[in-house]
Image (cartoon, coloured by chain):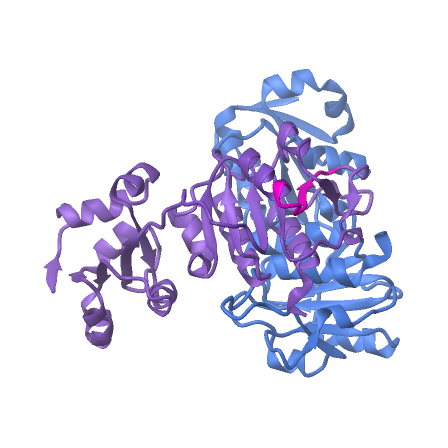
Chain colours: A purple, B blue
Amino acid sequence: MEELTSVHNQHVKNWKKLQTKKFRRQRGEYLLDGWHLVNEAVKAGILLRQLIGTADQLTAHRELVDRAAEAYVVTPEIMQHITETVTPQGIAAIVDLPDAHRVPANIQGAWLLLDRVQDPGNVGTMVRTADAAGFAGVVVGNRSADLFGPKVVRSMQGSQFHLTLLEGDLHKWVQDFKRIGAPVYGTQLNPAAQNFRKVHPGPTFALIMGNEGQGMAADLLAETTTNLYIPMRGDAESLNVAVSAGILMFQLNQELD
Amino acid sequence: MEELTSVHNQHVKNWKKLQTKKFRRQRGEYLLDGWHLVNEAVKAGILLRQLIGTADQLTAHRELVDRAAEAYVVTPEIMQHITETVTPQGIAAIVDLPDAHRVPANIQGAWLLLDRVQDPGNVGTMVRTADAAGFAGVVVGNRSADLFGPKVVRSMQGSQFHLTLLEGDLHKWVQDFKRIGAPVYGTQLNPAAQNFRKVHPGPTFALIMGNEGQGMAADLLAETTTNLYIPMRGDAESLNVAVSAGILMFQLNQELD
C-alpha cells in the first residue's frame, strides 16, 4: 500500500479531477465516497480499481484491501479534498464508469427517461426511487445532470449497481418503445392530460419526467402515447419532480405488491 | 421609502438575523425571498410588514409598495446578504410568523406529522406535497427542522399560505386523532407492517413520517393505529423520506380524483 500525504500528488489530483464530467469520460472512471457505496460495489462484484482510505479504516478492513487492484493510505485532509464531504468516513474507491451508450438487445420492463432534469440531487433521487420501484433502467437525455457526478452518486445510494443507467437520444428511445407496442407516458402539468390513476400498463413501458422549471420539451410530449397528470388541489402549483416521479413510478409499476 | 446602503444598518442586521430560529421567535417574523413567495403572501391576504427591494424592482412595482406597511430600497449587496441567495430577484418581505402552537378547535381532514425530520429541504418539500395532495395541515415535533427557516421556506414555495402549519407534541396529537376515532398511520421500513395500498382511510386521518436515517421513534410507532410499508424490490434499501411521503399522501388522500 502506497502512502500519500500531499494534495499535490498526481493520484490525488486525478481523484479530485474526477469531480468533472470531462475527466470522468477521459479516464472512464468515477469515485465512490463512503462505506455504503464501496460495500454496494463489492456486493455487486464491481472491481475496485483503487481503494483509498485513511490508515484507521484500511487497517480495520484488511479483507477489503485484498480485493482491490491497488490501495492507497491517505490523510483525512486528502480524503476531504477529493470527496468534498464535510466529515468523510475515510473510505473511497475508484471504479469503472459503465458504458452509458450500450444499447440493450431488447427493451423489457419499466424504464424512466429524464428530459433535461438539471438538479443532481433530483436525478440521483429518481434513480434510487426507480430502483426501489423495480424499474429496469433509467435513460438520461443530453442536457440532464451527469449520472456519475459526485452529488448524483451520493443521492443514488448505490442504485447504479441494481439497474441499467444509460445516456441517449430520448426521441430514439420513444420510437423504440412504440415500435414494440409498449406505451410511453409523458408528464404534463395540465388537467387536459390523463389522470395517472387511470392508466394500467403491462410490464414494459416508459415514463418521461421533464425539467424542474419547464417540464418536458414540447416536441417530446408530442411523440408520447399518453401524457399523465397528477391531480392537485387548487392552490398548489406543482410538485417537486422527484416526488412526482415517485408517485408515478409506484402507481404504474405495481408488480411488487 | 427609506434607502439603505450599508449592511451595518440596524434593519439589515435584523433581517439577516431572521435566518436564526431564535431571532424569528423573538420577533415573531420571518423573511420571504423572491417574487413567487411575496406574491403568494399578497394573494393570501398576508400583511407585508416590511417590503425590501432593489430600486429597479420597487420602481417597477409601485402597487406593491402601496400595500406594504413599510418599504425599503436596498442595494443588490444587501439583498444578497439577507437572503443568502446567489442571484436574488431583488425583492423580499418580512411577514408575521403564524402562531405555531394554536390548537385547532376540531381536527378534520388529512394531516401530516413529522417526527425529527432534519433536512430543511425534506421538510419544505413534504409541506409542498401535502398542500398538493389536499392535506389540511402539517405538525412538526420538537426535533424537526424549523418550519420557517430560509431553506424550508424556499422548498415550501408558498404552501404555508395554503395549509395549517403547527408545532407540537406528536404523542398528544396521536391521542387526539385516536380519541375521535380517526386512524393514525406510522411508517416503518419493515415488511411486517401493512402494505400501504391496502388501507383506505376516511377523510380524517394522520400520517407520520420519521427521521431520514432512523425512521420514526419506537415509542411513537407503538402508539399508532397501523404502521405502513411501501413494498420495494430486494436490492433497494429505502426511499428518500420526501419521496415516500409523496407516494403515501397521494395514495391515502384520493379525494382529488
Magenta segment: does it hold B216? no
Highlighted magenta segment, given as a residue range: A179-189
Q: Nearer the viewer, residue B52 or A124?
A: A124
Q: Is residue A231 above or below residue B91?
A: below
Instruction: Pinpoint residue A100: horizontal percent, then vertical percent.
Output: 40, 45
Q: Is residue A120 left or right of residue A113?
A: left
Taking the spot 21% from the left edge, 65% from the top edge, the residue there is: A68
Taking the spot 50% from the left edge, 37% from the top edge, the residue there is: A141
Instruction: Pinpoint residue A103: horizontal percent, then vertical percent.
Output: 45, 45
Q: Is residue B3 above or below residue B226?
A: above
Splitting the image into 4 quarters, where does residue B232 fall? bottom right
Q: Nearer the viewer, residue A159 or B217?
A: A159
Magenta segment: does it hold A182? yes
Q: Nearer the viewer, residue B177 or B146?
A: B177
Q: Is residue A27 left or right of residue A189?
A: left
Q: Is residue A199 above or below residue A167?
A: below
